[in-house]
Each structure stands twice: as C-alpha cells, then as structure tokens.
Amino acid sequence: MNHPFHESGAPSVFWWILITGGIGFAAGFFGPIALNPEANQGPLVEIFISGPVGAFLGLVLYLLSRPLHFSAARQWQVLWASGAILAVVTLSFCLPGPVFRGFLLDAQIQGCKPPEQVADDAIAYWEKRVAGVTWAAPRAGWQDDARHRLHEDQAVALEVMVVRKLGIYESRKPWDKGGISARGWYPENEQKSYYAQYAGGACEDYPLGSRSVRFVSYNPPGMAGMPFCLPFRRHRSPPTSKTRQGGTNRRAPSGASLLC
C-alpha cells in the first residue's frame, strides 16, 4: 500500500496524481464558467480532457522523478510547478475566441427595387422557414404586418455584384476585448441581394454602377428576407482596438470602427 508520503517526505504517486489531476479538473471546470460562460463547455473540458490529462501527467512525472533521485523538496517544487503550468495551459484553452460580426463587401450596384416589389418573395421565404418550426405557431396576420412594414420602411432592395469581401471578427479575450480583426480580402464575384437603408429610401439614392465598400452585419435577415447592408458608423473606439489584415496587426483609425 502506498502512503501519501514516503519516509523521506517526498510525495508519493498518490499526491502526484491527486494534485495534478485535481488542478486540471478544477481549471477545466471553473475556467469556462469564469472566462467563457456562453460556451457551456465546462463539464466536457474537465471530465474528458483536463482532469484525465492532469492525472496522467502526475503519473508520468512521478515515474520520471524516481530515476532522477530528486530530493523531497525538489519533487514538491516540480509537482506544484507542473500543476501551475497545467492550470495556465487549461485556462488558455478556455478563453473565448473571436466572434464573427459580419463582412465588409466591395460591391457594385446593378439593380434596385422598392421593398414592396419583393414582398411576395420575402413572405414566401419566411413561410418556408416557419413551416419547419413545429414547436410553436406563427403569429396570426404576420404576412399583412410584413407587407405594411415593407411599404413604410425607408429602404430599398439592392442587387449587387460582390467583387470581394472581408470577414470581420471581434476579440473577446480580457486583454483585447472589443478589438477588431480582419481575415483578409478574398474574391467573390457573385450577385447577391441586400436590404439597404444607408443612403435613403429611394432607388435614386443608389446610382447604378456605383461601387463602394459596405458592412453587412451577421444578424437575422432584414424585412425582405435579405441581409442588411449598412454604412460605416463613427464612434469612439478603445485605443487598443486593432485591425488585423494578412497576419499583420494594424491599429484602427482614431475614432473609427468597423462595426455598425
């Protein structure tokens, strides 16, 4: 039978496994709760990864310490240092990753319609989506409300040729929270439809053939069943916010933000 301590005062295999396994278990359980509560991954991390890995690490370190003939004090130092490193590594994996916020689109306007002209297609789109929902009934009269809102909205339905686009992400790590990163432009060359309000509510406000860069938010589609095409908005941004392009960190312009 292994006693918790050897006669020399060195930790036995029991303590190596208990301490490293316990630290891995605790870091894997409480780390996601504290650092990334939206992920709901705590039980998975501590049960299947950090706890067993910590226990296995303690066993390996115990076996390695035998032939090296470390003193009892040195073994305790190695044990606690290993536990600390395991906790830091586990917590680093629990940190929230960047969240996708939308696209910057470099696009050319090819067509424009008042939103009421696409009402039938929009309502057909949503009727198809609603038909797939079996656990709740749709609100009565929503089709008429949608047509009324499309008629009242100061918006247009644009047909554009997307030349290229750029994914926009927001950092959620504590030391860079709110920082903006971009993953690099890539060609698209695809015709798409967008629900736009940024220049006004008439097609005359959107000259055919004009080309510009707009932000499209990653949100539920607009009233016409199409994503919203939004302008850039200016507001104060944290001095630490950055835009990363092509792997290079670039500080965002003062007072400007890519998010709408």
Image (cartoon, grey):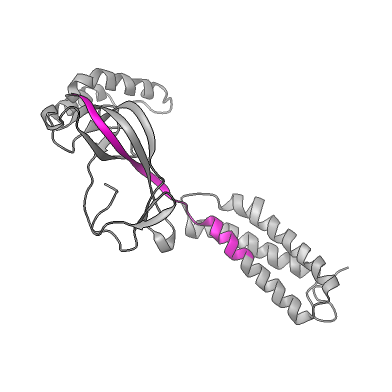
Residue 164 in percent (x, y) is at 34, 35
Quarter-of-image position of residue 88: bottom right
In front of the other: 185 or 204 = 185
Q: Could you say where residue 259 lies in the image, as x and y percent from the top left?
A: 29, 48
Closer to us: 161 or 135: 161
| Residue 188 in view here | yes
Describe residue 190's horizontal placement relative to residue 149 as left or right.
Answer: right
Question: In the image as oriented, which residue stretches furthest toward the right?
Answer: 1
Residue 238: quarter of image: bottom left
Q: Looking at the picture, tell me which residue is in the foreground, 20 or 135.
A: 20
Q: Position of residue 245 (x, y in %)?
A: 39, 50
**In the rendering, at what x and y percent does residue 153 appear?**
16, 31
**Residue appearing at x 64%, y 61% in the figure:** 24
Q: Nearer the viewer, residue 1 or 91?
A: 91
- Residue 178 seen by the camera: no
Which region of the structure is painted magenta? 86-112
**Compared to 227, does 80 lie above or below?**
below
Residue 109 in magenta stretch: yes
Residue at point 27%, 24% (across, down): 140
